[in-house]
Amino acid sequence: MLEVPSTTTPRVVFRYENTTAGRVWLSLAGDTFARVVATSCGQVLLEAIETSGGRRVIIRPRTPAELAQDTCNAYARPVSTLDATRGGETLLSCTDSRPVVGRSVLDRVFDMPGRTYTGTGTGSDSELAFESAIWHSGAVCGALGAGAADDEILMHEMMHAVRQLRGLMHCAPMYGDYDTQEEFFALVVANIYIACKTPAPGDTSLLRSNHHGFGPITGSAAGWLDSHRRNRVYLGQMRREMSDFWGNLSRIPVGQCWFNPVRQVEFPPAAGSGATGAAGGRTTASVTAGPVQFDGEPQG
Ligand SMILES: [Zn+2]
């Protein structure tokens, strides 16, 4: 296997076989990554990767076995699950949010029951299994719906990855068919990304509603924030855990992003202004570019 850093940042690495198929994969995945970071929202995520303790996102092809099991998917998998998990939190399965229980060799020798694991929160490299071509128009996963374009899938997975790099992963159960809170964060940020790249203000058919398929959100873009009473609670958690990333998302100019609940929370409209949250707030500088399941249970 070869590893080549992205031309954009050494913190994102492509790992591939030096074969014809491997080089085709590299070209396509590199193109997808380049389109992500060409947007303001992609630049914000890139900045977060660059400021995650030197840890790396390693993008690799999905294996034939992975593709055979679940064709239309992608994963972000921490190299060290315990280091990717928030410090002091019990390690939860990202499949069903139950505590992961294991038995060590000594447990078996002593005939002891299994035990749970606790995250260190120190952060881990993340291995991101991704295929670009399957999501292209006309390909096998090319018409699944909202949030299912190749760059949108990659953005979603990179949000999982950055939380793993920073030791924030915690697959606690979540309402609204998000499955876990990690999926909530990935979906919201990927939707902001979609609104950053698409010059179609208010076209909510483009925004993915939950983690069960690729259906669009209902209601208006500005109305999503208060469409569930707990959306603000979990966005508040993201604000506390990732204040730098949050701040940069909130400062993306309205004219560059027509769905941005982070901005709505950070810069609420003045009472009686009639403005939507996304349109309110002070004018700020444009986003600065960066310098530039147990034992690997993946987050899809
Ligand atoms: Zn996901």
Image: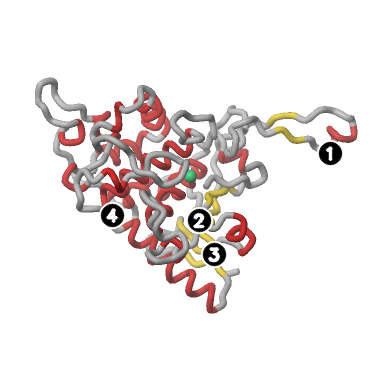
The mark found on residue 39 in the picture is 4
**Dots 4 and 3: beta carbons under 8 Å?**
no
Q: Residue at x 60, y 62 (%)?
A: 63
Q: Which residue is mark 2?
A: 72
The reply to whether residue 52 is in sight is: no
For marks 2 and 4 on the same chain, the one whose residue lies earlier in the sequence: 4
Instruction: Judge the density around disc 1: few (<14), some (14-19), many (≥20) Cα neighbours within 10 Å.
Output: few
Check disc 3 and report the residue beneath it.
15
Q: Is residue 130 above or below residue 264?
A: below
State the CA–CA distance, disc 4 to disc 3.
Answer: 24 Å
Percent position (x, y) of residue 244? 35, 38
| Relative to 236, 279 lies left or right | left
Q: Is residue 43 left or right of residue 124?
A: left
Residue at mark 1: 105
- Cα–Cα span, label 2 and label 4: 24 Å
Other residues around mark 3 within 10 Å, as few (<14) / some (14–19) / many (≥20) = many
The x and y percentages for residue 266 are 26, 30
**Label 1 beta carbon within 8 A of ligand 1:** no
Q: Amino acid at mark 4?
A: Thr
The numbered dot on residue 221 is none
Q: Mark 4 or 3 closer to N-term?
A: 3
Nearest to N terminus: mark 1 or mark 4? 4
Local secondary structure at mark 4: loop
